[in-house]
């Protein structure tokens, strides 16, 4: 069986030239004479701040929560993950663009974070981390003083 790439707009000259160039790169990097190229996975991260905490979200599709570890040492948050690929003995890949692998991300934490109260949850391929601020770091609303 031959797999052919679908090209709905194949009559546009510029796109044809670009696809030709893209196909050339694809064929170069899938050459049997080159060692297998394994891309490095680096999860994307969002960090936001509220009055009482910082919130981090890491995109870790395909990673189960048991594949991920978090630790804090010397105000550095280390997030590591390892995803093992299934070994299929009698199969031949014609194209492989995602695979198992590992990652590690390190974040220096500010002094206003209470490292003893950090919490994490994993849901739908998103790792959510709550980094609560120390009570003294939380800005309190101005207190109005009544005049007698």
Image (cartoon, rainbow, N blue to C red):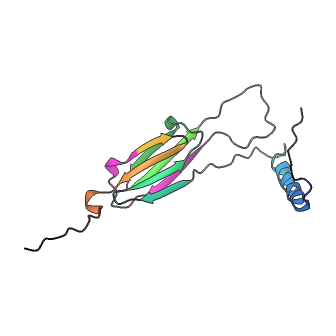
Residue at left 59%, top 51%?
Answer: 42
Q: Is 115 on the left-hand or right-hand side of 87? A: left
Q: Up-down: is 102 above or below 20?
A: above
Against 77, residue 81 (above or below) is above
- Residue lying at the far front of the rendered structure: 148
Viewer-side residue, 12 vs 134: 12
Residue most toward the bottom?
147
The residue that appears at 57% across and 50% down in the rendered structure is 43
Which residue is at the front of the view, 58 or 80? Answer: 58
Q: Which quadrant would the C terminus be assigned to in this image?
A: bottom left
Q: Position of residue 132 (x, y in %)?
A: 34, 53
Residue at the extreme top: 90
Does 107 appear in magenta?
A: yes
Residue 102 percent across, percent down from the top left: 59, 43
The answer to which quarter of the image holds residue 20 is bottom right
Q: Pick whichever, 50 or 127, lies toward us.
A: 50
Q: Residue at coordinates 13% horizontally, 71% vertically from top-left?
A: 146
Q: Is residue 43 magenta?
A: no
> In x, y percent, where is residue 130?
40, 50
Compared with 139, 24 (above or below) is above
Residue positioned 54% across, 40% down in the render: 124
Relative side of 139 to 65, left or right: left
Quadrant showing the N terminus: top right
Where residue 65 appears, as percent x and y from the top left, is 50, 37
Q: Nearer the viewer, residue 51 or 133?
A: 51
Query: Which stretch appears magenta?
Result: 100-119
Q: How many marks?
A: 0
């Amino acid at each position: 069986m031959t797999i052919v790439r679908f090209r709905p707009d194949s009559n546009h000259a510029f796109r044809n030239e670009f696809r030709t160039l893209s196909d050339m790169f694809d064929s170069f990097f899938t050459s049997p004479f080159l060692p297998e190229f394994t891309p490095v996975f680096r999860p994307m991260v969002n960090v936001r701040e509220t009055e009482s905490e910082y919130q981090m979200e890491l995109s870790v599709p395909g990673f189960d929560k048991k594949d991920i570890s978090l630790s804090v040492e010397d105000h550095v948050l280390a997030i590591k993950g390892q995803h093992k690929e299934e070994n299929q003995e009698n199969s031949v890949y014609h194209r492989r663009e995602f695979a198992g692998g590992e990652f590690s991300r390190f974040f220096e934490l500010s002094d206003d974070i209470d490292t003893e109260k950090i919490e994490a949850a994993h849901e739908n391929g998103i790792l959510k981390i709550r980094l609560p601020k120390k009570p003294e770091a939380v800005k309190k609303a101005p207190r109005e003083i009544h005049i007698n």
